[in-house]
Amino acid sequence: MPIHPYLNFNGNCRHALEFYAQVFGQPTPDIMAFGDQTGSGGEAVPQDMAHLVLHARLNVHGTSLMFSDAMPDGPVTFGQNITLAVVTDDLDAITREFSALSVSGRILMPLQETFWSRAYGSVEDRFGVQWQFSHEV
């Protein structure tokens, strides 16, 4: 059974999801908003939460990433304990995606040859998510 990384955001999940879909050449997936649901007792979700993303899933290089906004009373720490690794034999994709994630982000290690990879680098994107890219033949 695969592990699905789950990314949580503080109210900007929809924007992040659209950004990642564009970077990885995927269509924007269906988004389930908090407002599409009712509370456990059948009550309506508070209006200020209705637009927030309850759940969405995006396929990136064969891995299903899941997304959600945090509840307003339980925000997440920016970039909290998540690193996603993209390992592929497609050097062009690595270069393109690394570059796209670097825009308004921070390069932690530039793409470069290492003893384990023809091209390895890491970047923190504009949403605080850290990505590792590794070329594997």
Image (spheres, rainbow, N blue to C red):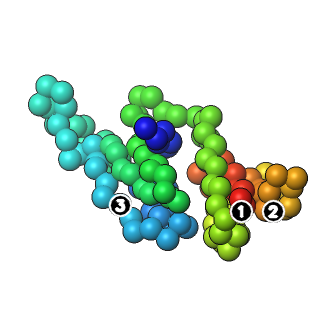
Measured in 3D between alpha carbons, the distance from the residue under mark 2 to the one under mark 1, in whole angstroms, is 9 Å
Whether residue 8 is visible: no
Q: Position of residue 104 (x, y in %)?
A: 67, 62
- Which amino acid type is marked by label 3? Pro
Badge 2 element: loop
Badge 1 element: loop
Q: Which residue is mark 1?
A: 137
Closest to the camera, between mark 3 and mark 2, is 2
Q: Position of residue 47 (x, y in %)?
A: 25, 43
Q: Label 3 crowding class (10 Å Cα cut-off): few <14, some 14-19, many 20+? A: few
**Tag 2 near tag 1, CB within 8 Å:** yes
Furthest residue in direction front, as rendered? 137
Rendered view: 84 above or below 120: above
Q: Which residue is mark 2?
A: 118
Front position in the image: 91 or 77: 91
Front position in the image: 39 or 67: 67
- Which amino acid type is marked by label 1? Val
Q: Residue at x 71, y 62 (%)?
A: 137
Q: Residue at x 42, y 56 (%)?
A: 58
- Which amino acid type is marked by label 2? Arg
Of mark 3 and mark 1, the one earlier in the sequence is 3
Furthest residue in direction left, as rendered? 42
Find residue 29 and name its label.
3
Of mark 2 and mark 1, the one earlier in the sequence is 2
Q: Label 2 crowding class (10 Å Cα cut-off): few <14, some 14-19, many 20+? A: some
Q: Residue at x 71, y 59 (%)?
A: 136
Measured in 3D between alpha carbons, the distance from the residue under mark 3 to the one under mark 2, in whole angstroms, is 32 Å
